[in-house]
Image (cartoon, grey):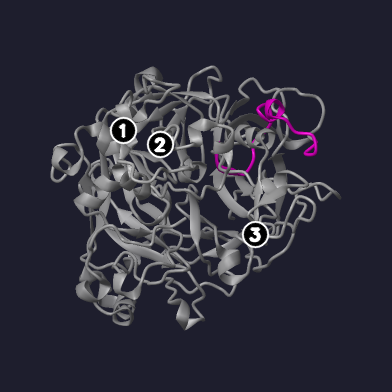
Amino acid sequence: MSDPSPKNTQPTLEQVMLSRRQFLGLAGAAGAAALALPGRALAASSLTPSTLTFTEIAKRLAPEPAVAPGYSVLPLISWGDPLFDQGAGFDPARQSPEDQARRFGYNNDFTAYMPLEENSSTHGLLCVNHEYTILRLMFAKLEKTNERFMATEAQGRIEQEAHGCSVVEIRQTPEKGWRALESGTYNRRITATTPIAVRGPAAGHARLRTKADPAGTRILGTLANCAGGVTPWGTVLTCEENFDQYFANVPDGHADGDLWKRYTIGNDPYYNWHLFDTRFDVTKEPNECNRFGWVVEYDPYDPASTPVKRTALGRFKHECATCVVAPDGRVAVYSGDDQVFEYIYRFVTAKPYDPQNRAANRHLLDEGTLSVAQFKADGTLRWLPLIHGEGPLTAENGFTSQAEVVIYARRAADLVGATPMDRPEDVEVTRTGRVYASLTKNKDRKKSQRLPSNRRGPNPFGHIIEMIPPKVAGGRDHTAETYRWDIFLEGGNPAEPTHEAYYRERPSVNGWLTNPDNLTSDAHGNLWICTDGQQEAVGTSEGIYAAPTSGEERGKPKLFFTAPIGAEVTGPSFTPDGRTLFVSVQHPGEDPEDSTYEQPSTRWPDDLPARPPRPTVVAITKDDGGIIGS
């Protein structure tokens, strides 16, 4: 679904810096820090031993998951498990939209553990995104049209109810371990048909108005919910990513044709919902596609509350919405636009966060400044504001208001000169205040399009970039206009010269990784890296790798967990005490392409005849009750 054309003319690597070989050689030399270029060495005073003392596992490709010795993996909740005391177990051969709306959704992605009972690590809420559905693994005896599986209306409406988010109350006890509470007080489903409010600059704008919603302030559903974030005031941000895959029948010659094309909305959707739900037929409802691609905020502690699409954060393929409180009290929200040659964004609230008054933060995300990253060759990063009336964002260029700037944030970012990246994915802020963004891959980047921040072309293995806000009194200033940046690692096998891999400390034969995606960090500042694309790239299962971000093994990954064949690991989330790691295992059995409901490549987690694989959230714990990673 990538767009192979860069959107502005950044200088090439050859034009701005040393050759790659010279550059990496200097980065490893004692004088590299003086160059003020990416790849600088750490000061000797920071060289401390790694806290990641677990025994690394071997790369593999198998029907079931694996984890480091001394750890256990417990399937906690799976697609179809009931959330509202439904009694009977899940029968995938007998599904209905009404029933699915009361069960855990499909393809769990982002996972957030939200404590109950005073920051408890044994009783809380599991908040989970459901990114997409896979027809051939959800239903038996499908029919094909033009070599594609097609959903009936009933199946399509089940798919809609399997999208969105789940909130599940969970508890850990010494006797039973972790378990999901089927009739938990806070249990909730948000789906593709749930009413959602709209706030911020785009609320009520003409391009958000439809026949069903002439005011442009109430949208049915949230779609393609990939990664997300948690606000300092205890709400969840769920991000709409590949929303273009739902829309069809783009009319030729329409005035908005170029705007649709910029968001890759065309006539080859992944779903065929437009055949029974006219809001996904662009000819019949041309503005509906503008109502997706937003960050949605919901309150997991109030099941009756209405989710809100926060339009001030911009419209694009949001991979995440990672929040951090700056020293002045304002909140920065980082987000990647997950498509090749797209951008990394930051939103900074206009007002500070009030830690004493949760209600005062209710609409904090409606006012602030959206900006986009420009990575410069001298190792500096500039945040370019996307503000109507400033620079090229004027009526002459098609922007008559801030509403149009956020609705067409990609065009705005093009015009101000943002740096096109290699599929920006998740963003994580560690305890040091440094910011890490994963760039999963970009096979479309050519050698002539190499940049200091995207040094390989093509880049099939991905990399992680480190963004370093300046230090001020109280910590790192996440509102600053200028940061420094660095390359943390470049994926691939360091033993294969053609991979052009880069690690500060050479990993083991099992520790090297490709295609970094979701990220989290622990109390020690270690980065936990999930992969997406490793099975395709190098033929091994997707995994979770852990790497120190400081000390003598900075940037050296170790393999901790591997997923079942065809699955991706996503949404890693720790309990506050660091003794449980929740992980979403989504789309088990999706690969190879001939894996189907009747004959899947794995039947995990149930491993029962005639039962398809089920996306599942697992709880990983250490057998001796210790800290994850130790």
Q: CA distance from mark 1 to mark 2?
A: 9 Å
> Disc 2 to disc 3, how far (Cα)?
31 Å
Question: Which percent across, then down, holds residue 8?
Answer: 24, 59
Nearer the observer: mark 1 or 3; the answer is 1
Q: Are marks 2 and 3 in contact (CB under 8 Å)?
A: no
**What residue type is disc 2 on?**
Trp
| Residue numbers of the magenta segment | 91-112
**Disc 1 target residue:** 312
The residue sitting at 38% across, 43% down in the picture is 316
**Secondary element at tag 3:** strand
Q: Is residue 522 visible?
A: yes
Q: Can the viewer see residue 623 in this picture?
A: no
Q: Position of residue 308 (x, y in %)?
A: 43, 26
Secondary structure of the residue carrying numbered label 1? helix
- Residue marked by disc 3: 562
Q: Which mark is residue 294?
A: 2
Residue type, numbered disc 1 = Ala
Q: Is residue 110 magenta?
A: yes
Mark count: 3
